[in-house]
Amino acid sequence: MVGAATIATFFVAGLASLFMAWSIGAGSSGSTPFAPAVGANAISVMRAGFFVGILGFAGAVLQGQGVTEAVGKELIGGVTLSAEAATVGLLVAAVLVAIGIFAGYPIATAFTVTGAVVGVGLAMGGTPQFGKYVEITTLWVLTPFLGGGIAYATARALRGDALNEGWLVPGLAGLVGAILANVEFALLGPPDGSASIAATLAPVLPLPGLTATVLVTLGIALAAALVLARDVARDQAGAQRRFLLVLGGLVAFSAGGSQVGLAVGPLAPLLSEFDVPLVAVLVGGGLGLLVGSWTGAPRMIKALSQDYSSLGPRRSIAALIPSFAIAQVAIFFGIPVSFNEIIVSAIIGSGYAAGGGGVSREKMVKTVLAWVGSLVLSFTVAYAGFTVVDALLV
């Protein structure tokens, strides 16, 4: 039977998780998805904060399971995080993220949460999971090069004369449609899993599984391209803005699916002990993201949209496409990833396509230092903090 003290500690851990969810919603998941669209004057700051909250909540519930379980169960071996450890880790990470929000610098949330969870886990006597660390570090290191590189190439193509923009933008929409067709959703899968739109529709066709899935993917991609091509033919500038808003919505949805795991992941090992279903925790974390987006995101949206680069619609589109793709890769493999890192890298890449595009090098350097410092600091403070708490509870 679970004791009253343990229940109280779990309650405190839940409050810490909500605080973390608010911090993430006000920071990375709430500010980054629509920052390029705001920078391109396609949507206002306040309206962006409203829609990103709704879409982030949906993503948290429909795609949040993978990263949640990875953060809670795959970063440390040999021990199960206790309620006290989860509380310390979440509080350390949330405070660092909140400091970044009010200081105007986007702290990489995945860095702080990962460092804090590993810190408290090792302080409990757990063993490092180097295989998972390599997987995570690989994506973290590749993200600036892949996101920035793809954004740069896309922005250059959109600005150049070699390719007809009337065909290129619909082609990009088709690419986004193909990715979306293979994104997995909890509602489409079995009770304990998920499935993509393409995989769900493929059995309708009298063809082998892989062939049918490819054909469904191509069909959805073609439909997306044709819809945007028709829109471009009527109003090219308006079509770009509408495409940009759709991309912002997809990135916001992906942000919820990824970032909610950073807020509620440390609670995952405790759910069976307290007989709490994972979906209930995902809903609670999604609500925390939503409130954070509505109350704290506008400040960071402004910082990202204006301080890093002066973006037009073309460069904003170029920034959001790789952001959406990288986010979904991270969700698929259950890797905690920072949306600040994804979006900032893509914004910088698209900005350089215009010869610099107003990119602030000083801001870039300070941001990278903040990312690295948050990882080291969160690990150190969480390790020391839990060691002290554990000694006091003995």
Image (cartoon, helix red, strand yellow):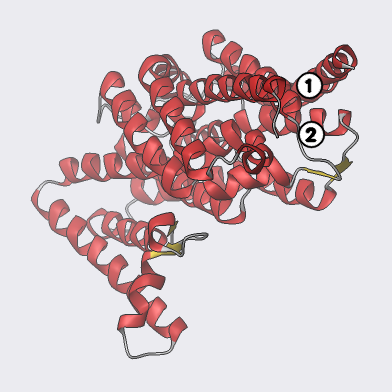
In the displayed image of the protein, which residue is found farthest to the front? 1
Tell me how many marks there are.
Answer: 2
Image coordinates for residue 6, horizontal then vertical, percent: 70, 24
Q: Residues within 10 Å of mark 2 (few under 14, many from 20)?
A: many
Q: Quadrant of the N terminus?
A: top right
Image coordinates for residue 234, horizontal then vertical, percent: 8, 51
Q: Quadrant of the C terminus?
A: top right
Residue plotted at (47% across, 60% down):
191
Residue plotted at (40% across, 17% down):
302
Residue 193 vs residue 355, the one in the foreground: 193
Q: Is residue 246 above or below residue 225?
A: above
Disc 2 residue type (three-letter): Val
Q: Secondary structure at mark 1?
A: helix
In the displayed image of the protein, which residue is found farthest to the top? 103
Residue 115 vs residue 368, the one in the foreground: 115
Q: Is residue 197 above or below residue 246?
A: below
Residue 378 in view (yes/no):
yes
Q: Which residue is mark 2?
A: 118
Disc 1 residue type (three-letter): Ala
Say whether residue 120 is left or right of residue 320: right
Residue at mark 1 to residue at mark 2: CA–CA distance: 8 Å
Image coordinates for residue 12, horizontal then vertical, percent: 62, 18
Quarter of the image for residue 166 reads bottom left
Residue 77 vs residue 319, the one in the foreground: 77
Q: Secondary structure at mark 2?
A: helix
Q: Which residue is mark 1?
A: 382
Say whether residue 313 is left or right of residue 129: left
In the displayed image of the protein, which residue is found farthest to the left? 234
Say whether marks 1 and 2 touch (CB < 8 Å).
yes
